[in-house]
Amino acid sequence: MPQNSTTALSAAETALGRSRLYDLLGRLYQRGLTSELLSHAAVIPQLNVIPTFDFPEDEAAAEHHALFAFNVFPYQSLFLDPSGLLGGAESTRIHAAYAHSGFQVDASDASPDHMGHELNFLGFLCGAEADAWTDGLPGVAEEMRQRQTAFLDTHLLRWIGSFVEAVSRQAFPFYAALAELTLMTVADHAAAMGMSTTDRSPAFALSDPLDLLESEETSLGDITAYLLTPPYSGLFLTRDDIGRLGRRFDLPRGFGERRQLLANLLQAAVTYDQFPPVCTELAAECTQASQRYATMAEEHPVLAPWLVPWMERSRETAALMEVVIREAERLS
């Protein structure tokens, strides 16, 4: 045992509690709210939107699928990689971090950058820290804490704000509450690791966006691609977001993936002389996203260095859409 057993026990208990919470959060993102997880989630006050009787497991599974398979895709690569594709450099970086600490995901899962896996990995590191404190190995415990800090800094904190913002816009109260709890948990963890906004400056910046105004040949397809690339636009537009926009202006969207839906919507907006008001609404979405990031930073100051790039980028996109509107009106 370490010399100060009371302090060590407190540190071990804190790390173990954090490990168990991360494990639960990770499983909820991966599997949804099942009857098995219900009893664990129901005791958490922040998740008080859970039905406590006659639990409709089939409906819960359908809701999980509708949100994370069709709307907010919970993968780091889809939020940070300008290619807009699953995998790539972001997945490679994640895999390297896991391998360095001996953490493995299911061999059949080709996407290690899933939110659930990232939370489970933090739970794994916190569990290792708890074991080290219990075994009287403060050096090992400190190494595990350093790995937690590095992973938060270079991975999860870079996209969790945009992920939470996107989930909050969808019509899924349980997952909105889950996302907010996740943000609170991560903010508390970052603060406990000493990741202060006053003594560090993370080298984090979103990828430089394409200049849509540089060429006179910018097309609706270019605008569509820009808006649907989170590191360019500053937000993650979902199928349901696009659907709500189409219904508001009574415009057809057709069928297909997000890019096809938004391209169809913008083309229909041009055809029916609704392009400026549709773009105005898109600009408003960006402005609202920027305001939500600002609110997150106010509520969780420790996260501000990772939220500010998203706040600024979504605000820049709102301004860009205003220029697009003026140019469209000039040409009409």
Image (spheres, helix red, strand yellow):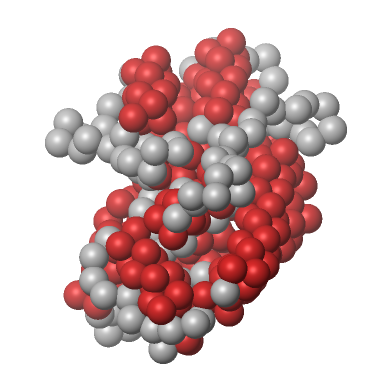
Q: In the image, is residue 292 above or below residue 229?
A: below
Could you tell whether 211 is left or right of 61 in the image? right
Q: Quadrant of residue 192?
A: top right
Decide which of 134, 253 is in the foreground and name it.
253
Point out residue 206 in the picture as x, y percentages from the top left corner.
59, 37
In which quadrant will I find the C terminus? bottom right
Q: In the image, is residue 164 above or below residue 251?
A: above
Write the residue at 55% across / 50% down. 216
Write the residue at 45% across / 38% down. 82
Point out residue 260 in the picture as x, y percentages from the top left corner.
30, 62
Q: Is residue 253 visible?
A: yes
Q: Is residue 48 visible?
A: no
Write the residue at 34% across / 70% down. 264
- Return the residue found at the far left: 108
Decide which of 265, 120 is in the foreground and name it.
265
Decide which of 332, 3 is in the foreground and name it.
332
Point out residue 170 in the picture as x, y percentages from the top left corner.
46, 71
Could you tell whether 40 is left or right of 126 in the image? left
Write the residue at 69% across / 52% down. 316
